[in-house]
Image (cartoon, helix red, strand yellow):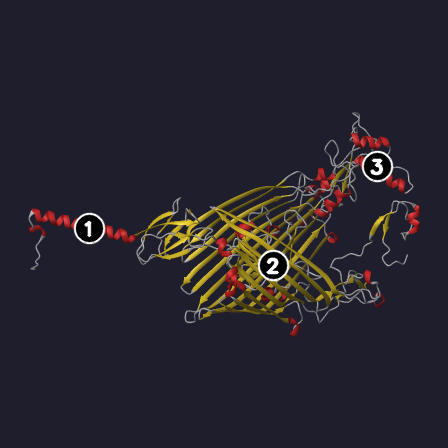
């Protein structure tokens, strides 16, 4: 065939028409081919339902779209591209197109991921490979609680963790946290670690910012050394995700009321009881029958009031509110979470001077500097405002408890009634009539971390971080006299209205105290991580690290009394000379630690872990006593992976046995007890007629052998799943022996020696018990059901501490739980004089008195 070229202009009309048709067909085919190659479609599901608003991103570009209401999407991409699917609350997925035009995927909820990967000390681990007693609760579970204090939200959610809230006062409502009960005669509080930084606070973290909380309950905590004997709580905050930015706004308006209000006797009943007590003592009655009648019927509320002090003091409902806004998103190169929150709590008092408010800001940024370098920067700032009256809540409550219903809390004309004692009227003391106590706390916490992947050594990464924390506290207490009103019971005005006399109570004149405190902490650490698998069966992980912590604290205060007027609440207006006081102090702290962890498992069936920490603390004397070694070892066996278990997998789909032993420490004691303490004597000495000279006194005898408490912790546990994960369970038994507990030895040293010995490491306490959790995860259609129950039992007893020698065994506390009391045992009531005479009794006992058991039968 002979081919030749001919210009288009020289073609005849028919050929031109043919060329145009051919060109149109070729162009159309080209466009169709391009479109077929460039358009990728699909449906994104969660379970059986389509998932809307999923961000579908072409990796490495800004080309992104969102799925519609049915989960469908269409996006332009080439055959070699990779799609990134992301959605808040779900695990991001990367899918290679590989020439496909249709890609359907199912998103997996982050909650499921958290059950697989657990945060542990200085890292994370697959839950399947854990051998320690470790419990985790998701942040999404914590936000279901209306509590504004994060520590309160842990109640009932973690097996082995006891949460005791002793006060509901706004700003002071933090819970006491105990992991596996009480183990020491001293401080039992656990170590709190927030985003890898030990020693930070738990209470004021916004629950909406929390990703998860992990509790280390056994030897797994040994990697935190001398601060871990009471357990460790790890808090992980949320971070950014790749994909479309998501704005989340939430607001909670709540109302609180007292759970239990003491029911006190009314005025008539109280008057009758007083008369009975008087009669019992052989005295005349304090109230006549007419008095009791008037108290009961309220016929004269001026002379015969019937005051319910708690009803006068507390209002039915108080409000609390909590608002939170967060922005979360990012790309493959940079991810971010930015959030802000505000909370407010009012007290339950009427006309309350008590309230708490907090504003907080958080920014967590993750940047991928290169393929092998990742940078993380976290910033948290908050301001806490506490407002209180000048009398504490305990004083106000105690005053209401002691208030007589026969005394007017508030007169019928609205003026405050007389005091119960010492000028105290709780209705007035709960308001700002006595002045104010204002406290502002600023928190500024930062953390910067760099992770470097060593490309020429597979599985090797190096990390370094620096965390700088600053806390500033300002407090101003302005105390002023308050007025109460009294009636002599007789004086009336011309209209027969009682004449009240105003009387000033409390402080003789206004006085002011201002405090300022500043605390700084710096935490530096470096980590080396290595992970490797041999032949796909032998899995090896190693961690080694070093951590240095330094901090300082300073505070001072100033007091002035005898203010001329309550109109000016500034220091300059106070009295001079002896009417002003000031003081201040400062301290330093430092720690140096070396730690590590070694993990090995064979096919995730036979699992072992060894952790250690070589811990040095400023609390103890220089030399060998300043450093301690804390090891922990644990083993696990996944029975359900054995061949012989195949016949049981349809019922028990997963079963793991585990055990651990370790030594941890507790150094929660006052520092520098190995040094003598000195202070100025309260009285000065006169060497010249007009010259006072201060003298130094020794305030503390040193204990140069002081050291940390040692906890020997043993744990045996079992965990598993039934019916393909629909039911899960865990159970643990633990035995903890705490030695070297600091205690005074003064009981066995006679007072006649004149000695006051320092505390010594002599105490021993045993604590043992068990805990369990059983739950179910079900999905019925699009409805997910998750229910669990947990419980436990712990009992401690004192093995040794100093007691008075020669005391009868029944009077000793050794062998009994800590905090036990030596009390009389009631076994009944004397019915008549004959029964009094027949049984040993207290002097002057008579019929109607309590019978106390004669424990040692000595009569």
Q: Secondary structure at mark 2?
A: strand
Q: Which mark is residue 536?
A: none
Indicate whether 141 appears above or below 253: below
Residue beneath disc 2: 731
In the rendered image, the residue lying farthest to the bottom is 624
Name the residue tied to disc 3.
272
Q: Name the foreground residue: 68 vs 658.
A: 658
> In the picture, residue 616 is in which quadrant?
bottom right
Alpha-carbon span between mark 2 and mark 1: 70 Å
Residue holding disc 1: 27
How far apart in space, not on screen, are marks 3 and 2 (Cα)? 56 Å
Label located before the other in sequence (3 or 1): 1
Of mark 3 and mark 2, the one earlier in the sequence is 3
Vertical arrangement, residue 290 with respect to residue 438, above or below:
above
Image quarter hosting the C terminus? bottom right
Side of 192 where 699 appears, left or right: right
The residue shown at (90%, 52%) is 839
User: How much space separates mark 3 and mark 1, taking CA atoms?
Assistant: 108 Å
Mark 1 lies on a secondary structure that is: helix
Compare residues 581 and 205 and report the one nearer the observer: 205
What x and y, as percent, mark residue 476? 66, 49
Is 223 left, or right, of 843 in this rendering? left
Residue found at x 84% / y 68%: 753
Task: Give coordinates of residue 652: x percent, y percent.
Answer: 53, 58
Residue 819 in view here: yes
């Amino acid at each position: 065939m002979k081919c030749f070229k001919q210009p288009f202009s020289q073609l005849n009309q028919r050929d031109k028409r043919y060329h145009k048709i051919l060109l149109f067909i070729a162009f159309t085919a080209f466009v169709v081919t391009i479109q077929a190659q460039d358009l990728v479609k699909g449906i994104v599901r969660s379970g059986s339902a389509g998932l809307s608003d999923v961000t579908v991103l072409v990796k490495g570009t800004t080309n992104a779209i969102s799925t519609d209401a049915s989960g469908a999407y269409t996006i332009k991409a080439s055959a070699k591209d990779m799609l990134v699917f992301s959605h808040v609350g779900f695990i991001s997925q990367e899918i290679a197109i590989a020439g496909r035009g249709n890609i359907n995927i199912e998103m997996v909820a982050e909650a499921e991921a958290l059950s697989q990967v657990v945060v542990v000390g200085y890292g994370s681990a697959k839950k399947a490979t854990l051998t320690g007693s470790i419990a985790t609760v998701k942040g999404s579970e914590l936000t279901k609680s209306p509590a504004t204090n994060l520590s309160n939200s842990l109640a009932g959610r973690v097996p082995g963790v006891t949460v005791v809230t002793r006060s509901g006062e706004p700003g002071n409502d933090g819970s006491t946290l105990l992991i596996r009960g009480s183990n020491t005669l001293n401080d039992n509080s656990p170590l709190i670690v927030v985003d890898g930084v030990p020693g930070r606070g738990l209470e004021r973290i916004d629950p909406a910012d929390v990703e998860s909380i992990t509790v280390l309950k056994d030897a797994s905590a040994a990697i935190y050394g001398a601060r871990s004997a009471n357990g460790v709580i790890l808090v992980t905050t949320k971070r950014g995700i790749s994909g479309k930015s998501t704005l989340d706004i939430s607001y909670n308006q709540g109302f609180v009321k007292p759970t239990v209000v003491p029911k006190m006797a009314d005025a008539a009943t109280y008057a009758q009881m007083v008369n009975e007590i008087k009669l019992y003592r052989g005295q005349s009655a304090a109230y006549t029958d007419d008095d009791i009648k008037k108290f009961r019927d309220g016929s004269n509320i001026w002379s015969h009031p019937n005051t319910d002090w708690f009803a006068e003091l507390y209002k039915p409902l108080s409000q609390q509110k909590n608002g939170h806004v967060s922005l979360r998103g990012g790309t493959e190169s940079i991810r971010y979470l930015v959030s802000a929150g505000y909370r407010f709590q009012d007290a339950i008092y009427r006309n309350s001077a008590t309230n708490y408010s907090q504003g907080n800001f958080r920014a967590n940024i993750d940047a991928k500097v290169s393929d092998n370098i990742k940078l993380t920067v976290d910033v948290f700032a908050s301001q806490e405002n506490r407002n209180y009256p000048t009398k504490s809540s305990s004083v106000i409550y105690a005053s209401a408890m002691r208030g007589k219903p026969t005394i007017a809390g508030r007169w019928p004309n609205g003026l405050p009634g007389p005091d119960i004692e010492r000028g105290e009227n709780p209705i007035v003391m709960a308001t700002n009539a006595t002045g104010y106590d204002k406290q502002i706390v600023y928190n500024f916490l930062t953390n910067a971390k760099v992770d470097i992947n060593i490309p020429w050594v597979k599985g090797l990464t190096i990390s370094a971080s620096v965390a700088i924390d600053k806390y500033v506290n300002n407090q101003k207490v302005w105390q002023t006299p308050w007025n109460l009103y009294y009636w002599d019971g007789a004086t009336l005005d011309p209209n027969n209205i009682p004449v009240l006399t105003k009387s000033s109570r409390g402080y003789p004149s206004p006085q002011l105290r201002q405090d300022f405190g500043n605390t700084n902490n710096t935490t530096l650490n470096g980590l080396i991580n290595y992970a490797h698998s041999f032949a796909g069966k032998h899995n090896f992980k190693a961690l080694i690290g070093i951590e240095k912590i330094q901090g300082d604290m300073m505070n001072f205060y100033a007091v002035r009394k005898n203010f001329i007027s309550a109109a000016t609440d500034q220091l300059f207006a106070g009295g001079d000379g002896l009417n002003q006081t000031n003081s201040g102090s400062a301290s330093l702290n430092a720690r140096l630690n070396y730690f590590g962890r070694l993990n090995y498992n064979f096919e995730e069936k036979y699992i072992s872990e060894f952790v250690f920490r070589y811990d040095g603390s400023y609390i103890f004397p220089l030399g060998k006593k300043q450093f301690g070694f804390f090891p922990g070892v644990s083993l696990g066996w996944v029975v359900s992976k054995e061949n012989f278990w195949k016949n049981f997998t349809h019922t028990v789909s997963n079963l793991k046995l585990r055990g651990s032993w370790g030594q941890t420490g507790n150094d929660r004691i006052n520092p520098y007890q190995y040094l003598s303490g000195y202070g100025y004597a309260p009285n000065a000495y006169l060497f010249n007629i007009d010259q006072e000279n201060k003298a130094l006194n020794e305030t503390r005898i040193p204990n140069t052998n002081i050291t940390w408490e040692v906890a020997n912790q043993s744990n045996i546990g079992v965990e598993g799943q039934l019916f393909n994960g629909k039911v899960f369970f865990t159970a643990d038994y633990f035995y903890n022996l705490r030695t070297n507990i600091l205690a005074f030895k003064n009981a066995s040293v006679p007072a006649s020696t004149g000695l006051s010995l320092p505390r010594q490491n002599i105490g021993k306490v045993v604590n043992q018990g068990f805990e369990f959790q059983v739950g179910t995860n079900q999905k019925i259609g699009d409805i997910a059901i998750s229910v669990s129950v947990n419980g436990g039992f712990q009992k401690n007893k004192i093995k040794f501490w100093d007691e008075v020698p020669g005391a009868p065994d029944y009077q000793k506390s050794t062998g009994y739980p800590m905090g036990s009391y030596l009390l009389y045992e009631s076994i009944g009531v004397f019915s008549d004089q004959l029964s009094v005479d027949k049984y040993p009794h207290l002097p002057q006992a008579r019929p109607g008195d309590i019978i106390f058991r004669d424990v040692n039968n000595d009569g």
